[in-house]
Amino acid sequence: MWVKELSKTKIFFVLTVLALLIVFPDFSSAQTAVVRGIVIDRQGNPLEDAKITFYDQTRGTKYTTRSNKKGEFIKMINVGSPPSVYKLTVELEDYFPFESQYQGKWGVEEELKITLEKIPPKIEEDRDYAEGINFFQQDKYKDAIESFKKSMERFPDNMDILYNIGVSYLRDGNLDEAINYLNKATELNPEVIEFYLALGECYFKKGEREKALETFSRAVEIQPDNPKTHYNLGIVHYRDDRTEQAIQSFETSIELDPNFSSSYYQLGLAYTKTEDFKKAIKCFEEFLRLEPNSSDANLAKEMIEKLKK
């Protein structure tokens, strides 16, 4: 009888211990920290509805909250033992995501201040810029300039706008203004050959051949494998009676692009100057093969007839 009572006592004791284990979990895994913070922009304005995430990559635990109208947020997270290192991310539409690390301390309330950088708008999506491109394609250069300048108010010192304004002035015949804007574009990015091609054309049309030669030579330095750069350099050499240099430039252009029709035409003119008529005829014939309907096609045919005689 005594033995039976003892067994019941043991059973009761075991059940009691199990119950205690269920009611009272391991305190080492329940250590928490309270995190308060504010999300603002570069000017210090609060940002609402920013998504704040604390992610423990080791334990796979994730806590998420959002900022209120004042940009504030509060979240209780489990820091664990040993303390967890969380990956902190803050996301909001139209802003660059923020990433950092956060290690909470048990029983400590911390405050965070997070600044988000706004993603700049894309120039291609700007209405005035798109309107300027449309006007330019219709040869309405003054209207294009006006639209591009409106766009520049929102995108100051944007090299694409400066370039397009410069080319619009070039096509409209205002070479001084064109040079002004194109030079500003090259200052922002001195490695874009389109800037130099347009700028060199401006100097060439103004009769400033040395500046044109210098500008086109710079374009060749930047992209020696671009046929346009050698073609433009050849034009300046040809106009300044440096015929051998012109021939070399046009031949290089053709080597880089065997279908560059304009180089064949100019090379034909250069060979005519040197009285190498067979080569000149061959160049004009190749030009006609590539551009039978060109505005210069009749001139090429006339040159061939004269040279054959």
Image (cartoon, rainbow, N blue to C red):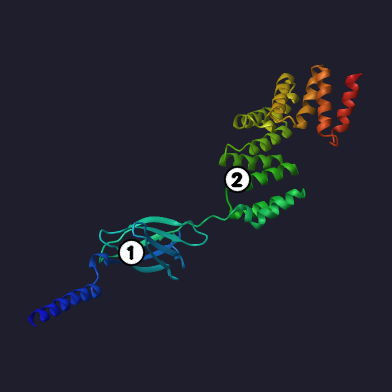
The residue most toward the left is: 2
Residue name at image x 60 percent, y 29 percent: 221
- The residue carrying mark 2 is 159
If the image is split into quadrants, where does the N terminus sit?
Answer: bottom left
Q: Position of residue 227 (x, y in %)?
A: 69, 31
Q: Tell me which corner region of the image, top left, top right, bottom left or bottom right, holds residue 18.
A: bottom left
Q: Is residue 153 visible?
A: yes
Q: Are marks 2 and 1 in contact (CB under 8 Å)?
A: no
**Would residue 7 be found to the left or right of residue 18 on screen?**
left
Amino acid carrying label 1: it is Glu
Q: Residues within 10 Å of mark 2 (few under 14, many from 20)?
A: many
Q: Position of residue 219 (x, y in %)?
A: 63, 32
**Would residue 272 be found to the left or right of residue 64 on screen?**
right
Q: Nearer the viewer, residue 62 or 36?
A: 62
Q: Is residue 141 visible?
A: no
Residue name at image x 10 percent, y 78 percent: 6
Amino acid carrying label 2: it is Met
Q: Nearer the viewer, residue 221 or 5?
A: 5
Which is nearer the N-term, disc 2 or disc 1? 1
- The residue carrying mark 1 is 111
**Would residue 27 be found to the left or right of residue 219 on screen?**
left
Query: Does 207 appear above or below 117?
Result: above
Residue name at image x 63 percent, y 56 percent: 126
